[in-house]
Image (cartoon, grey):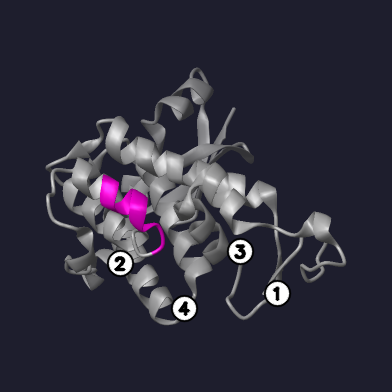
């Protein structure tokens, strides 16, 4: 049940807290309303209405549209940095839709979009797979983005995207870099590297070299796949 913003059931007793869906559709569109309602929380839970939440849902759809249609990031090549998060997203969204856990499915799609913004490249296959997933909740913008990618037929009858179990195993990991016990940054490395290889990568990182320049390295402590601490004086 969707409650008023005061946390009480909408009704004549508190008319100022009653939300008219038609007003939301008129201001933001049906897709925004649908997305927000599905994102509010578990279907069986009672949730208070939030105008800020509606704004947030609308801004997310604007980010998605801008990324896929306006930013010219679609490429016909592999982008390995997105392999894990894309296949993770397809797996989670598929499972969550089957369990009617729409709020967590949307959360995962938001994670995916955030990662694409960081990489600034999006393989066409991944863009189309994402549109298929989000169009279940936001069909109008889904159809429009599908058409913008050059398709003439409706997305409604397209095959659901598949995920590759092999791509769900991360081959790289972020490790923290400390210099004399102070956190200075992170570096992404292959999980299969040995300590010497990790040391070499860390010592060649620009932000590390600038901080240890002119100093003598006394010790390098490597906790594999977690942290590297450089002691330099």
The residue indicated by pointer 1 is 46
Q: Disc 1 versus disc 3: distance between alpha carbons? A: 9 Å
Q: Which mark is residue 100?
A: 4
| The one of 23 and 4 positioned closer to us in this rendering | 23
Q: Position of residue 93 (x, y in %)?
A: 38, 69
The answer to if 133 sits in the magenta stretch is no
Q: Residue at x 30, y 67 (%)?
A: 168
Q: Which numbered disc, 2 or 3, marks the residue that appears first in the sequence? A: 3
Q: Disc 4 versus disc 3: distance between alpha carbons? A: 13 Å
Question: Pointers 4 and 3 in contact (CB under 8 A)?
Answer: no
Q: Which numbered disc, 4 or 2, marks the residue that appears first in the sequence? A: 4
Is residue 138 visible in this depiction of the protein? yes
Q: Disc 2 versus disc 3: distance between alpha carbons? A: 28 Å
Q: Disc 4 versus disc 1: distance between alpha carbons? A: 16 Å
Badge 1 element: loop
Give the answer, above or below, for where 202 lies relative to 115. Answer: above
Left or right: 113, with 82 as reference point: right
Of tags 2 and 3, the one toward the viewer is 3
Of tags 2 and 1, the one toward the viewer is 1
Is residue 191 visible in this depiction of the protein? no
Give the answer, above or below, for where 127 lies relative to 160. Answer: above
Q: Which mark is residue 40?
A: 3
Q: Which numbered disc, 2 or 1, marks the residue that appears first in the sequence? A: 1
């Amino acid at each position: 049940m969707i409650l008023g913003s005061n946390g009480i059931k909408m009704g004549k007793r508190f008319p100022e807290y009653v939300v008219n869906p038609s007003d939301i559709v008129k201001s933001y569109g049906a897709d925004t309303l649908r997305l927000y309602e599905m994102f509010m929380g578990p279907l069986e839970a009672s949730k208070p209405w939030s105008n800020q939440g509606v704004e947030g849902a609308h801004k997310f759809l604007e980010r998605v549209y801008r990324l896929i249609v306006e930013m010219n990031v679609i490429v016909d090549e592999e982008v390995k940095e997105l392999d894990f998060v894309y296949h993770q997203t397809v797996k989670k969204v598929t499972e969550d839709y089957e369990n009617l856990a729409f709020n967590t499915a949307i959360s995962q799609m938001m994670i995916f979009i955030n990662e694409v913004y960081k990489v600034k490249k999006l393989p066409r296959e991944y863009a189309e797979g994402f549109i298929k997933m989000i169009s279940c909740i936001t069909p109008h913008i889904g159809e429009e983005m599908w058409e913008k990618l050059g398709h003439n037929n409706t997305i409604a009858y397209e095959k659901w995207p598949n995920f590759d179990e092999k791509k769900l195993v991360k081959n790289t990991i972020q490790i923290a870099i400390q210099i004399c016990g102070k956190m200075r940054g992170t570096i992404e490395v292959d999980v299969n590297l040995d300590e010497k290889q990790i040391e070499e990568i860390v010592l060649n990182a620009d932000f590390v070299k600038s901080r240890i320049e002119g100093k003598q390295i006394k010790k390098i402590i490597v906790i594999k796949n977690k942290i590297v601490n450089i002691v330099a004086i």
